[in-house]
Image (cartoon, helix red, strand yellow):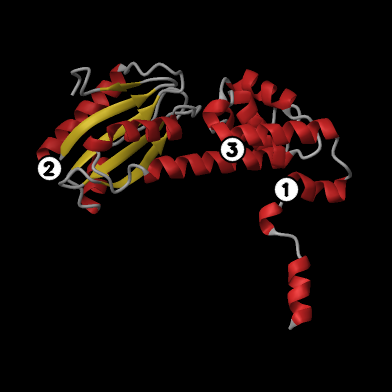
Amino acid sequence: MSRLRSSFQEMPSLFSFDPDEAVVEKAGKQPSYIRDHRKRLRERFMTGGAGALPDYELLELVLFRAIPRQDVKPLARSLLDRFGDFNGVVSAPVPRLEEVSGVGEAVICELKIIEAAAHRLARARVLRKQVISSWDALLDYCHTSMAHRETEQFRILFLDRKNILIADEEQARGTVDHVPVYPREVIKRVLELNASALILVHNHPSGDPTPSESDIDMTNQIHNACQTMGITLHDHLIIGRSRELSFRAEGLL
């Protein structure tokens, strides 16, 4: 027993694990200036949080694990030059990320893990919540999941009688400026979920949330179908790159 206890005490602590050092054991010694820079950056993040770091440094933190022995600052800046900001980088389509020199499978995997985590966290803040009282969180979720898409996506948020969000589903995907939506299919799904109200959401890849004539016509068709079935259409949100448009607020609904 004492021998077993002694062996256990000699094992390295899980809490002292350094991901850079783990990779370096096989790949060779990491240059000290890179190791020191990464240590300082992690310390600043842990002390001041994400707000203490500009986008390129936050992106460096993500890239550290994917590229353990190189200076990742040039790649971080290249990605930001290409995709605009941190959100644009992590949500960029895989084929476009592959076009950037220095981006391989490991980098793409790390970025997509961050994107998936962001979507799940944002969704958790609104699912099963009273939508009216958590409207800002709902808008954050819509922007996180849709603002940087390169093609149009149409989603429906289904609510119960207390305006609790019970389901969030993608109904259709389209091209850069059009997504097909069929009112009959929308109503069919509302009835399947026993929902009492809904919110329509779609994005404009151009970044401009101004509704097109087809957007307005489609919304009116769904609104009329909802009224026939006694279903409330609370709003139709169009998500742009930096802002959204509410049909309700604009008097279009």
Q: Specify the farthest residue to the front.
A: 2
Q: Secondary structure at mark 2?
A: helix
On screen, residue 15 above or below 253 = below
Tell me the mark number nearer the camera, choosing from 3 and 2. Answer: 3
Name the image quarter holding residue 46.
top right
Mark 1 neighbour class, 10 Å CA radius: few under 14, some 14 to 19, many 20 or more = few
Q: Amino acid at mark 3?
A: Met
Using a 10 Å C-alpha cutoff, classify the residue at mark 2 as few (fewer than 14 neighbours), some (14 to 19) or many (20 or more). Answer: few
Task: Write the residue at 36% across / 30% down.
Answer: 202
Q: Which residue is rendered at x = 19% and y = 33% of the image?
A: 234
Q: Give the camera-side residue of 189 and 42.
A: 42
- Disc nearer the start of the sequence (3/1): 1
- 9 sits left or right of 149 in the view: right
- Place of residue 23 in the rendered image (x, y in percent of width and height, measured from the top left): 79, 48
Q: CA distance from mark 3 to mark 2?
A: 53 Å
Name which residue type carries label 1.
Asp
- Which comes sooner in the sequence, label 3 or label 2? 3
Question: Mark 1 highlights which residue?
Answer: 18
Q: Dots 1 and 2: beta carbons under 8 Å?
A: no
Residue extending furthest right?
28
